[in-house]
Amino acid sequence: MPLQLNAKPSCANPEYDPEWWFPDPQSSRVKSPEVVEHNRQTLANAVLAMQICQECPLFADQSCLEYAMSDTTTIDYGIYASTLPTERRAAVGQTPHVLDKNPLFGQIRHQATRMGVIPVRIAPKERPKSSTLNFLDRRNDRDVLQQDLSA
């Protein structure tokens, strides 16, 4: 389900870093101070993103969650409607992804819940067959490119 053209998602606010919604844990057998700090900052940013999500009008009307569950790309990557890819993949019955084993995603959910982010119940559904990327021009508040990757 594409979002409405007049939709104003909170995550599109230019004051927010888009990377907050795409946690990228660094894993290393050796926990160097740089890796530990990166993961600490990733955790804090992801929790902040989830808090922002729950205040968004697209969270309230569930259109963000519907959007996230409509495409394989949005199921597998990013925070949408305060949900993590691990939670969305479980809802479509997908075998856990290699990143699902990273403890950071569990830590994000745990910390977000401790900070008052209510976990979203995702109704089980069939995994979509399509994979489409939408690119948002944040300065002009519009979609600039939609590319179907399912071919």
Image (cartoon, rainbow, N blue to C red):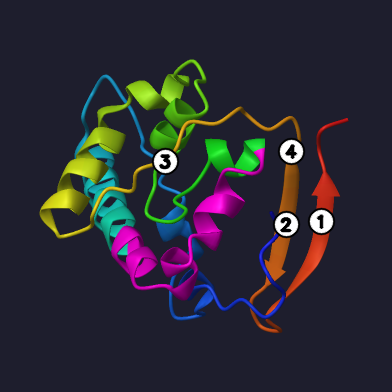
The quarter of the picture where residue 15 lies is bottom left
Find disc 1 in the rendering and name its residue: 146
Look at the image and give the residue range highlighted in magenta.
49-71
In 3D space, how far apart are the residues under numbered discs 4 and 3 (Cα atoms)? 20 Å
Residue at point 73%, 57% (across, down): 134
Quarter holding the C terminus is: top right
Left or right, 131 with respect to 50, comes to right
First in sequence: mark 1 vs mark 2:
2
Residue at point 69%, 71% (across, down): 4
Q: Residue furthest right?
A: 151
Q: Residue furthest bottom?
A: 140
First in sequence: mark 3 vs mark 1:
3
Task: Tell whether label 2 touches label 1 (CB within 8 Å).
Answer: yes
* Amino acid marked by disc 1: Gln
SS type, badge 3: loop
Find disc 4 in the rendering and name its residue: 131
SS type, badge 1: strand
In 3D space, how far apart are the residues under numbered discs 3 and 1 (Cα atoms)? 26 Å
* Amino acid marked by disc 3: Ile
